[in-house]
Image (cartoon, helix red, strand yellow):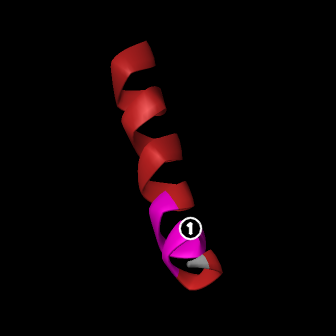
Amino acid sequence: VIFGMLIALPFTLLYYILLGL
């Protein structure tokens, strides 16, 4: 579960950055 969260975290951050742009 934690491993999946570590993988999903960078993608969610990139998603919020793209939304910010």
Q: Residue furthest bottom?
A: 3
Quick one: 2 or 14, which is closer to the camera?
Answer: 2
Q: Quadrant of the C terminus?
A: top left
Quick one: 5 or 16, which is closer to the camera?
Answer: 5
Residue at 38%, 37% in the rendered image: 15
The total of numbered circles placed on residues is 1
Dot 1 surroundings within 10 Å: few (below 14), some, or many (20 or more)?
A: few
Quick one: 6 or 2, which is closer to the camera?
Answer: 2
Q: Residue furthest top?
A: 20
Q: Which residue is mark 1?
A: 5
Quadrant of the rendered structure where residue 11 is?
bottom left
* Three-letter residue code for mark 1: Met
Quadrant of the rendered structure where residue 19 is?
top left
As drawn, 9 above or below 16 = below
Location of residue 2 in the rendering, given as x and y in whole percent from the top left corner: 64, 77
Q: Is residue 5 magenta?
A: yes
The magenta segment is: 4-8
Please state if 9 lies on the left or on the right of 20 as rendered. right
Q: Is residue 21 among what the camera can see?
A: no
Q: Secondary structure at mark 1?
A: helix
Q: Is residue 19 among what the camera can see?
A: yes
Location of residue 5 in the rendering, given as x and y in whole percent from the top left corner: 56, 67
Residue at 60%, 72% in the rendered image: 6
As drawn, 17 above or below 4 = above
Q: Quadrant of the N terminus?
A: bottom right
Please state if 1 lies on the left or on the right of 20 as rendered. right
Residue at 52%, 58% in the rendered image: 10
As drawn, 10 above or below 6 = above
Magenta: predominant secondary structure element?
helix
Location of residue 16 in the rendering, given as x and y in whole percent from the top left corner: 46, 29
